[in-house]
Amino acid sequence: MTDYEAFQVPYSLVVVIAPHGQANKIVRFAREHGSSGATIVPVHGSRKNKWLRLFEIADIRRELIMMAVRHDVAGQLIEDIAAKFNFKAKNTGIAFSLPISHLLGKDRSAFDEAAESGKSRAPLGSALFVIVDEGVSDEIIDLSYREEVRGATVVSALGSAETSNLVFDFPISPQKELILYVGDTAKISKLQQTISSAIEIDRPGSGISFYVPVEHAAGLEKEED
Amino acid sequence: MGALGEKFKEVTFSVLPVTILVAILHFTFTPLPLLTFWRFIIGAVTIITGLAIFLLGVDLGATPIAQYGGRVLVKSNKMWVVFAGGLFFGFLISVAEPDLQILADQIAHFTGGVLGRWQIIIIVSVGVGLLIAIGLWRILRRIRLKYVLYITYAIIFILAVFVPPAFHAFAFDASGATTGAITTPFILALAAGVARVHDGRTKDATDSFGLAGLASAGAIVAVLFRGIFARNMTIGGDIDIPSVSTKGHLLSSFIRIIPRFAREALLSIAPLIIIFLLMQVFTLKLRKRQVVRVLIGLFYCLIGLIIFLVGVTGGFMEVGSLVGMELAAKGNGLLLFCTGFGLGMLTVLAEPAVPVLSKQVESETSGNIPRSLVLIFLSGGVAISGGLSMLRVLSPGLALWHLLLPGYLIVMLLSIWTPDIFIGVAFDAGGVASGPMTATFILAFAQGAAHEIETADILLDGFGIIALVAMMPLIALQTLGIIYRIRTARNNKKALIKGEAND
């Protein structure tokens, strides 16, 4: 077994989920504040309004940004992004960071320098990942609203556990959706239970779900309107 | 901004340009009756509303159905199922296309009933179904679109030599008629669905395009084929100029036509409902939540389409023919030509299927071919179509084939150097451009102009405009493809030189 402690690198994965069209601005801002590169993924979220959901017009396009950032600056970067892009307002975005246990492709010398500034902090909450068949996300979002958890982010994806089957001599992969939540660990754990039993997650092929600790987060608490 | 708000914003930007152009004409060259002008403004607002709702419905309902359809066919892993499925889908959506029914009525009228209405509808639908089946077959067998197109158009030109000239116009207009507001998004998504399942992760977008272009060609082949057996037919008759009612209540021109378009829209959505329910019962077995979502989407398609068609016909059509008549009456050929050019350029932006295609190009190529470039070249192409249409109205000796023959020769010539993906996009764009907006607004404009000019023949000049609108995007977008190719080659060369310098 690989020991996570031994491999702990002084980097965090900063994840920002922002309204569509803001990603490039945020990445530029992050570059000036300690990030070196970023990956942008088109995703969509949903608004909580019952009526909008009933009429199927609650979807909002969003962008998910991933950046590996030194963990001593990650917390500050998240605060800065949240302040600059006003994540306190409703329907804007969130930012959080996850600890990285293994990292390749970064300048090694930076590791030692950063390591002196201390280890990562105790987890602040959790990020829940649920991977299911395409089209199931709507049901899961309905469930999470019932559990009082907001802010689902849906990523379209491909993949399967089995080796992909051949059709007309070409391998095909089933289409999937990855749904991401961030929140208080107790709430996230309860949500995982609810979702798992609702979609019978132990049945082969129905999906998987896991959660990981979150170090820093901003934008989770929105101003009430 | 939510899904609906985003659509409204996008659609406003596509309808506004043509609205502004007409407003400028109103205040300069062709003052319209005030009632007509206000109807036009109401029409523009109606079109924006209808189009936004319709496009939302396409995203929620029509596109998923077509993609499920593509997946169901491919996963059967049997070529005969794919072929039969393509034939069935193509036939069904084409049979229900309202534009085709109108065209069939007109053809029946001009041929004195020798070619019956249902005969034409069924022949064209079989042609469309057949070419869609062939199109799906070629995606799975990895046969290049180019070769299929060469063979299809070779057949078209051989057939064209042997049919009466009026059939040229019938045939090319049939191709525009079959690619209507709902048909085109469906065919586009069907192709993308099949190509994506097939390509899995490689994300090669080349085969996602071209199916709508083949479907249009299918309609042409079918009509020409029927024309072979109609060589001694007398063709003639008069066409009704869209009636210009400058009287009545402001809203009467809209309300009067609601029942007609409600029927038409319902008819064109019906095949999708049938296809979806059949698949759901037999193979899809989606969860209830997903079924509800798709059905709500189809409902939006229906409502949006009704509002859009009512807006176009009630607000735009009469303005189109009035502007055409008044400009032609001024006897200024250059002005007429320029207006045709401008109307073509801006009207195409408001076609319902244009945002669907441009967005699909951007997403399938992961942003490599930006949306705005596709729109600019498409606009440029249809602008030339608009200008050429006016040239035909102005010059009595200019027959449709005088433009179509060299045009399609250029198309075939360009395809030698065009990258495959742009060939597919170009042929799809041809079908997309000749939608309901062109068929009412530009057609009314040209017919209005032809009405005023003594040497022009309303029948022959009116027909064939859709053929020109369908042809020019093929040239324009292939040109874009060649520009892309040259630029990529130059960049690679630069990178190579740079690489060598580093060594």
Image (tube, rainbow, N blue to C red):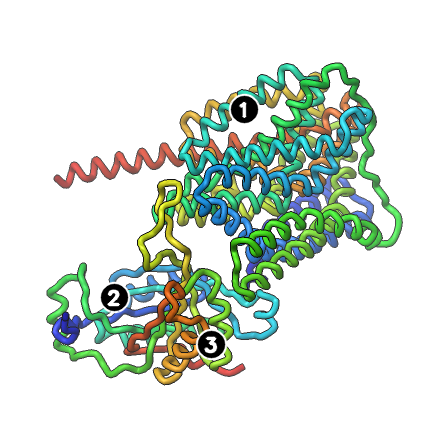
- Mark 3 vs mark 2, foreground winner is 3
Residue hosting label 3: A144
User: Position of A41 compared to B293: left or right?
Assistant: left
Residue hosting label 1: B153
The N terminus of chain A - image quarter:
bottom left
Residue A117, horizontal then vertical, whole percent: 15, 78
User: Who's the residue at 39% across and 73% down the image?
Assistant: A181
Residue A34, horizontal then vertical, whole percent: 25, 68
Residue B435 vertical position relative to residue A3 in the rendered view, above or below: above
Q: Amino acid at mark 3?
A: Ser
Q: Is residue B338 shown to the viewer in this render?
A: no
Classify mark 1: helix, strand or loop.
Answer: helix
User: Who's the residue at 38% across and 56% down the image?
Assistant: A158
Classify mark 2: helix, strand or loop.
Answer: strand
3 and 1 marks in contact (CB < 8 Å): no
Q: Do dots 3 and 1 share one subunit?
A: no
Q: Amino acid at mark 2?
A: Ala
* Dot 2 alpha-carbon crowd within 10 angstroms: few under 14, some 14 to 19, many 20 or more: many
Residue B470, horizontal then vertical, whole percent: 60, 33
Residue at far bottom of view: A186
* Dot 3 alpha-carbon crowd within 10 angstroms: few under 14, some 14 to 19, many 20 or more: many
Q: Amino acid at mark 1?
A: Tyr
Residue hosting label 2: A68
